[in-house]
Image (spheres, helix red, strand yellow):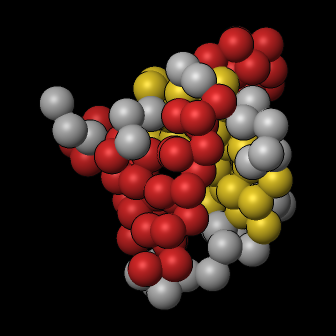
Amino acid sequence: MEKNELLLTAVKAADDKRAEDIVVLNMKGISLIADYFLICHGNSDKQVQAIANELKDKAEETGYHVRRMEGYDEGKWVLIDLGDVVAHVFHRDERTYYNLERLWGDAPTVDVQSELTP
């Protein structure tokens, strides 16, 4: 699967579970970890877990192996390593606290709004 296909699959999966404020950072040349960071949040532990499950399930359905998922049991910050895409699914309060968008402020954002349901 191409990186862009994987990224779009992840964005749509998060959106399907009503993830809020979906942001994608282009990490190429900035981080060796991944080419893209997907950052979003849910309003409860259960919603965070549902978003994480959907990301994992949709990636696997399209033939991509989830390398690692951490933080699922707590439901505060779930990190899903899809290889070229790393998804950070936060609880609203945790997202505000860690503020990855500011931490990685030199990374350009990728416009994914056209992929989201209105």
> In the image, what residue occupies the spot 58% across and 35% down?
46
* Residue 78 position in % (x across, y down): 72, 44
Residue 111 visible, this angle = no
Instruction: Point out the residue furthest to the left here.
Output: 118
**21 on left or right of 93:** left
- Which quadrant of the figure contains the C terminus? top left
Residue at left offset 75%, top offset 20% = 94
Residue 21 left/right relative to 45: left
Relative to 32, is 16 above or below?
above
How many marks the image carries: the answer is: 0
What residue appears at the point 76 percent right and 60 percent down from the top-left corner? Answer: 69
* Residue at (62, 60) in percent of width and height: 85
The image quadrant of residue 117 is top left
Nearest the eye: 66 or 111: 66
* Residue 93 in the image, given as x and y percentages of width and height: 70, 13
User: Residue 28, image x and y in percent?
Assistant: 66, 56
Is residue 24 among what the camera can see?
yes
Q: Is residue 71 left or right of residue 116?
A: right
Front in this rendered view, residue 6 or 108: 6
**Rendering coords of residue 56 (x, y %):** 56, 65
